[in-house]
Image (spheres, rainbow, N blue to C red):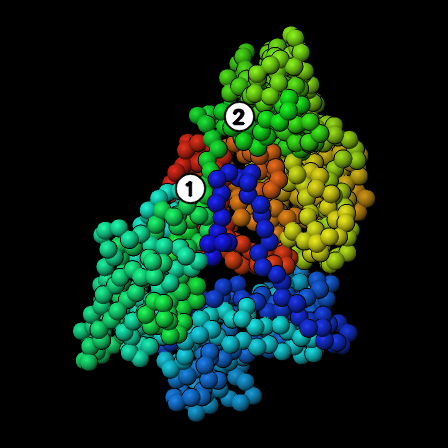
Amino acid sequence: MQVAERRRLARRRAVVAAVAGAALVATMVPGPAGAVTGGSTLTAAKQPTIGAGQTNALAGDWTLTPVTPTNTWAAGETVTITVGTPGPANCTGATPATNFVAFNGTPAVSVSTGGTATVTATTSSTALCGALATPRRDQLVLTFGTAGTGTVTISNVRYDVGSAAANGAVVVTAVDSDAAAVTTGASASNAFITRVLLTANTPAVGLRTGSGIQAISNVVIAESVLDAAGPLNVVCLQLAGGDTFDATAPAPTVAVSGGTGDTATVALAGGNTALQLTVTDSATDVGPSTFTISGLRLSAATTALAGPVTGVLSSGPCGAPVATLSSDTAIAGVVTTERLGGADRFTTAQILLEDAFPCVGTGLQNVVIARADTFPDALAASYLAGKLTGNVGVPGTGILLVDKDSTTLPPATVNALRNRGVDRATIVGGLDAVPAVLATALAAQPNVNCAGVTEAAPNSTIAVDRIDGADRYVTARNIAERPGLGAAGTADYDGTPADPDGTACLPRKTAILATGENFPDALVAGPVAFNGHNVPGGGSAVPPGTPGCGDGQGFPVILTTGASLHPQAAAALTNLGIQQVLVMGGNVAVAPAVVTAVQAINSITVQRFDGATRLDTAKRFAEFAIDFLGYNRTVVSVAVGNNFPDALAGGPHAGTTPANAIVLTETPTSVGAETLAFFRDRQGVSGVFGAPTPLEPILGIDVYGGPIAVSDAAVASILGAISQA
């Protein structure tokens, strides 16, 4: 990543999520009825470096995407993908029998929306390296068994590479049997073949911005065949975009292994932007050598900027490269880490509110008050917070917490009310949740201007309101209906990842349905409840500039019992005129009978986010918010998943523009496999919900709660996952 593309992230509110890259557009070629007549685009998720002479080397996944989402793959339609070496064609050149790239085994294939497909590895019409006892297979034939739409993913692609294969990207071409154009090119190459392998960032290193000079993992440069680059004598690792190594003592060192008799020296070059390895090759060398460079550090200037630090290996001296030997390789990752947490849940809520909603004018007109010791009444609070007026004329405020068993307000809550000049406090929950004595204490708080400097009027106090009900389900309904029966936000989404409306603009009133018997599923939906959204062009299939597709208004959270649709939930869905529902959790949390009952209400469409665990559900919903609703692609919020207060108060914070998705850790000290996979998977691969553009690497995380809630070790694990760009 270039320095111009890396960015300083001093505070979350300064971050603007950008959409990286532009989708490739295929040439429109007419085809028979049912074919993908608009053409398709073949792209590679990653381009790992693999060595000449290697077998069964893992390449990047391929994604085959119709140019227009409404196009259909026809039954019997085939797409033939052919691969070749970077230099002369397969099985040509001075040593044709060892100059090849070929498939090892058969990859896996999946279709995102409807339809089935199989894939087989074959030889091309002219047998590849036919002189060999076992001909090499250089083609994949993708065959659609039934008609369908959506994105095709080809995974677990593995190559055998001949020892004479040249340095460079694997060449990829594709042909559709129905005459529809398949766009390939550089972005379709899913591997970079090299005779000199570069390995770095193992173990993965994630660094906080502003952390100063920092050590990184060893860099390993290895010949894949004897005397690679003919012979190996000078190679250069050039950092991208002017990133620099630290030049202070001690200098990096190199150790040589393998082969026989090779020696090497290493030195920084190019104003410390590069590392030059000089090898003295032994005349008696009998095998490839490996050079392990240790003691490398990144400069303070490089760690001041968020983003992946990458480098490219080339033959020849630094400043005068002869040939490229690797794809862009991660050296480390630099991530802005902002911890928003205090000594207790009350202080964390104060910090989150004050960070998200600065002092403007006379202060906040409203704030939401919830109990801190249990969750039911507060699960729907983020939607209400998004609808209430914060600063004058601007919707949106935060959530503060109180202690049900105390007769006084927490000092942190009092401080937040005064610091932000709150005029009105709306309590969610009945007297059992927030007793009358606390409502009285709230009503006794002076109504001051922003930052508590001057009273708004002599002897005036905060106004107190309450939204409650006979139980949590009635309370959730009353919260959902308080902003108005027509206030629910809209989004252009009808329950399928590829959004078969295509470029059509069909916004629907949307609600979030979650169990009222537990908290994680509803809490991760907090930012979307607060902010809604479906920004045209910001991750949806709707092109930029299309009016009216998603109104940027929040989606109410409706609570139900798990086994059957609660009558209060059904009434809320009906009264609010809901047309589509996002169901949080799998069948254990929300039974299929509940979904059936929802669909029977005015033909409501449903999309379920049903992870195997609470972390997996959070992961899937975060991917949806980012890839389809247009949420921040470069900054993500993190909260502990086995307790609720920090994620509850974090909903409005994450939901303020530019809105972040929230993911959960398993415990304060353990991140969990699903959440770590979320961070690894966001590094440069296509979105999972029909996003038409490549992903940007994550540059920042907002951690909700202090080290007791999310430990420093857990944060370090996330940074390590992010660094695997």
Residue depicted at 26% across the width and 69% down the height: 278
Checking the image for residue 134, the label placed there is none
**Secondary structure of residue under mark 2:** helix
Choose between 370 and 516: the one closer to the eye.
Answer: 370
- Judged left or right of residue 299, residue 34 is right
Does residue 677 appear in this view? no
Q: Residues within 10 Å of mark 1 (few under 14, many from 20)?
A: many
Q: Amino acid at mark 1?
A: Val
**Quadrant into which the C terminus falls:** bottom left
Look at discs 2 and 1 and give the one toward the viewer: 2
For disc 1, the marked residue is 715
Identify the amino acid type marked 2.
Gln
Give residue 350's mark. Answer: 2
Crowd around label 2: few <14 · some 14–19 · many ≥20 (10 Å): many
46 or 496, nearer to the observer: 46
Of 449 and 289, nearer the camera is 449
Q: How many dots with numbers?
A: 2
- The one nearer the camera, 516 or 268, is 268
Residue at the extreme right: 602
Question: Does residue 354 appear in this view?
Answer: yes
Question: In the rendered view, does 221 fall on the left or right side of 701?
Answer: left
| Nearer-N-terminus badge (2/1) | 2
User: Which quadrant of the figure has residue 649?
Assistant: top right
Secondary structure found at label 1: helix
Left or right of residue 217, residue 672 in this image: right
Residue 101, given in percent of the width and then of the height, sits at 45, 79
Taking the spot 44% from the left edge, 31% from the top edge, the residue there is 706
Q: Is residue 496 above or below residue 152?
A: above
Rendered position, 69 above or below 515:
below
Residue ID at (63%, 32%): 382
Which quadrant holds residue 328? bottom left
